[in-house]
Amino acid sequence: MSKAIKAVVLGASGYVGGELLRLIAGHPNFELVAAVSDSQAGEPVASTFAHLGQAFENTAFVARDRWFENIPSGSRVAYFSAAPHGAAAASIAAALKVAKAKEIALSVVDSSADFRYARQSDWESVYGATHGAPELLDQFSCAVPEHLPEAATPHVGHPGCFATATLLATVPLIRSGLTEAEVFVTGITGSTGSGKSPSSGTHHPERNSNLYAYKPLCHRHSPEIASLSTAASGRETTVHFVPHSGPFSRGIHVTVQAKTTATVNAADLRRVFSETYEDAPFVQVLETMPKLKNVVASNMCQLSVASDGTSVVVTAVIDNLVKGAAGGAVQWMNRLMNLPETAGLNAAAPGWT
């Protein structure tokens, strides 16, 4: 079955797209047939991602309307979308239309925000734009894989990177009933979380040796985290989120705080998290505080808990480009394709990054 499933990456020239290409290169079951980028169409993949030159020596980017040219009818295709928010939905709709006409069985995992809300009005209120394919919303589920054992839809929208780390730290608390369903979250992200296009927030002299908050209590991930936590825990969740820009390229560190509903000690909390993630291959519950360098470039989430009896703290770390985007997308696609969930994702963090 090695390399039996053809893979397409939409938005392949961005940071998340590049990570998807890297993971597909090492995946035992996926074969890249199209790295889609209108801006880089015809250019070698290695001209944008020199570190992928050996893996894709003879591969060039293709335009959006040519992704299917090397795919025979009857093929199963893993279609990964790393297109920007607001642009992904229309492109996915067009791809699904082509796939139907050409009898290609397409499974989609979208890393943008376009399919993270079940209702069109919710998405449009957060993003202030008209949704590009509202007719597809009921064909997408959205959750971190650890909180939804099986998607009830043919396609998946992967939560954002801040949301992934926060949900993994929050949902077991809310679901257990040991805390109130109100959390206070401090998150710190690396500069790659802002995307490939340079901006003042990712400019090296501004970011290096610096740390600052932005959009406190009004970041667009807050309603996403609240709605997904509510869905996964079964309790209406209130989220107070303060994001920060960190002086590093990759990774997310979140600290989640909540008030207890009764006296709780750290052992109680650790038991809740260990039981929740007992069968989750990419989540480790530690007795020591998690550190970014132990997860960067891997699909792992490491977390730890603390309590003074009346309040609790959960800290979690992930790689924003892997577990928070490309790796989480591959994890979901493995499930959609009935592959082992860990396929292509078992590489350990390199350390000392």
Image (cartoon, rainbow, N blue to C red):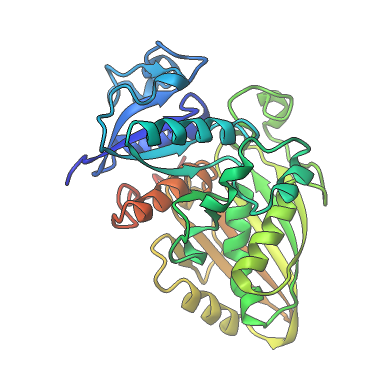
Left or right relative to 127: residue 39: left
In percent of width and height, residue 44 lies at 37, 14
Residue at left offset 58%, top offset 84%: 268
Q: How many marks?
A: 0
In percent of width and height, residue 181 lies at 74, 73
Q: Is residue 199 above or below residue 113?
A: above
Q: Nearer the viewer, residue 243 or 7?
A: 7
Residue lying furthest front: 101
Residue at left offset 38%, top offset 63%: 281
In percent of width and height, residue 93 lies at 52, 35
Task: Determine if residue 24 is in view.
Answer: yes
Left or right relative to 252: residue 125: right
Residue lying furthest left: 1
Residue at left offset 57%, top offset 53%: 138
In percent of width and height, residue 89 lies at 58, 36
Residue at left offset 42%, top offset 59%: 282
When asked about the image quadrant of residue 199, the answer is: top right
Left or right relative to 276: residue 47: left
Q: Nearer the viewer, residue 157 or 43?
A: 157
Task: Determine if residue 318 is in view.
Answer: no
When asked about the image quadrant of residue 18, the answer is: top left
Residue lying furthest bottom: 263
